[in-house]
Image: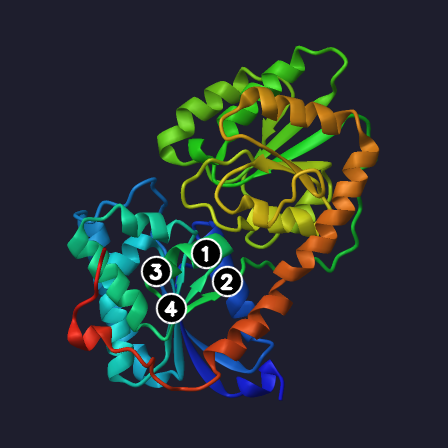
């Protein structure tokens, strides 16, 4: 019996963000829902998306408190109707509502899987004081399972005595349209992400200014993505002062892979602390692009340096400039890396990952053997 048969006529309560605004987490939830429509699983949805993204969530804001109350009310209303629960949660959501999500699921006898958005939950827990660390570890241990996006996060959570951790990689829908690779002169880069300093757009603009001063180097770069308010003024000022670059607006959710087939390479020099398996890298691999990114977090789980891309140290403009220059002057290398990217992308395709995810979620309805929520204690070293 395959994953589709196992999940037939099941109801899955999906808690997580949906676009707008567009972000890695909201696209992942949207892709899951699209896949469920092909797999005879009835989704019940609790949308946790904020009205706009900020670098930091302020828990005391009235808007945040009201949104939390709405999320919890709808969750409690829907949980009795489902067969299983999956929660795509930020670290803050796990801290504030995670206990109640798991407690309600246990009360109704529903298996519940927590899927942290990003991959910095381990360091987030370590940075909390002992009572909050114990609270978060208790929540994770009491869930039926925790779905880690990266092997790195899986190892970090196991080191915190969480044994119910499963590796479920990032995913994007397969690219089925015909690829039409650009055949023009020079190197045309693309940057697709939220325009926020930690994702690397300012470093990339600095590198582009250096390359523009080299008469023999023909490189252009287009930027796509929502510009966060905190960095809007600085970004557009820097953009206007840099030759060969253009801001092209937003990309439709799930449409980045097809867009990127018109480019030669993805430039994504991120240093964002919560980086897991960035969807933009998966989409670029599907489009057959070499990737220029950073030695940061679990990026190397997607990009093998020298094989399907080039990895540079975080914040190193010299190394980033050299990597771009190397691809600009070596078309054969670009073609080799593009083919390698397409090959590696298969393991991160939603039609591969999501059937495995559903097989895990619906394998049975048993509660976890541990009962930490009931006893309310966990050892924190």
User: Is 295 located above or below residue 242 in the figure?
Assistant: below
- Nearest the viewer among 242 and 138 is 138
CB atoms at circles 2 and 3 under 8 Å apart? Answer: no
Q: How far apart are marks 1 and 4 (CA)?
A: 27 Å
The residue under label 3 is: 48
Looking at the rendered structure, the secondary structure element under dot 4 is loop
The residue under label 1 is: 26
Of marks 1 and 3, which one's residue comes earlier in the chain?
Answer: 1
Which label number is shown at residue 30? 2
- The residue lying at 66 percent from left, 15 percent from top is 212
Which label number is shown at residue 123? none
Q: Which of marks 1 and 4 is in front?
A: 4
- The residue lying at 65 percent from left, 39 percent from top is 305
Q: Distance between the residues labelled 1 and 3?
A: 9 Å
In the image: residue 241, left or right of residue 106: right
Looking at the rendered structure, the secondary structure element under dot 1 is helix
CB atoms at circles 1 and 2 under 8 Å apart? Answer: yes
Q: Nearer the viewer, mark 3 or mark 4?
A: 4
């Amino acid at each position: 019996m395959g994953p589709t048969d196992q999940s037939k006529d099941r109801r899955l309560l999906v808690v997580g963000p949906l676009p707008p605004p567009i972000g890695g987490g909201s696209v992942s939830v949207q892709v899951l829902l699209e896949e469920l429509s092909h797999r005879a699983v009835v989704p019940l949805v609790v949308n946790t998306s904020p009205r706009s993204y900020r670098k930091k969530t302020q828990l005391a804001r009235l808007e945040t408190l009201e949104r939390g109350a709405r999320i919890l009310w709808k969750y409690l209303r829907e949980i009795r109707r489902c067969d299983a629960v999956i929660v795509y949660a930020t670290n803050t959501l796990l801290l504030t509502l995670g206990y109640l999500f798991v407690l309600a699921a246990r009360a109704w006898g529903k298996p519940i899987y927590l899927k942290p958005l990003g991959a910095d939950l381990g360091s987030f827990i370590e940075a909390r004081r002992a009572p909050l660390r114990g609270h978060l570890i208790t929540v994770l241990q009491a869930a039926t399972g925790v779905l880690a996006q990266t092997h790195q996060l899986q190892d970090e959570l196991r080191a915190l005595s969480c044994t119910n951790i499963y590796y479920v990689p990032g995913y994007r829908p397969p690219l089925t349209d015909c690829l039409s690779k650009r055949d023009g002169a020079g190197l045309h880069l693309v940057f697709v992400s939220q325009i926020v300093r930690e994702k690397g757009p300012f470093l990339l603009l600095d590198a582009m200014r250096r390359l523009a001063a080299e008469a023999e180097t023909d490189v252009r770069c287009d930027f796509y993505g929502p510009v966060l308010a905190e960095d809007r003024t600085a970004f557009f000022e820097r953009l206007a002062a840099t030759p060969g670059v253009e801001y092209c607006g937003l990309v439709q959710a799930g449409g980045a892979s097809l867009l990127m087939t018109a480019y030669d390479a993805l430039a994504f020099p991120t240093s964002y602390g919560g980086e897991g398996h960035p969807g933009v890298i998966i989409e670029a691999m599907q489009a057959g692009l070499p990737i220029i990114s950073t030695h940061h977090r679990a990026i190397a789980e997607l990009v093998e340096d020298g094989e399907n891309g080039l990895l540079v140290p975080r914040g190193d403009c010299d190394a980033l400039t050299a990597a771009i220059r190397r691809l600009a002057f070596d078309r054969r290398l670009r073609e080799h890396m593009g083919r390698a990217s397409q090959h590696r992308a298969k393991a991160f395709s939603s039609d591969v990952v999501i059937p495995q995810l559903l097989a895990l979620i619906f394998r049975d309805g048993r509660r976890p053997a541990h009962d930490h929520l009931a006893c309310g204690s966990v050892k924190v070293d």
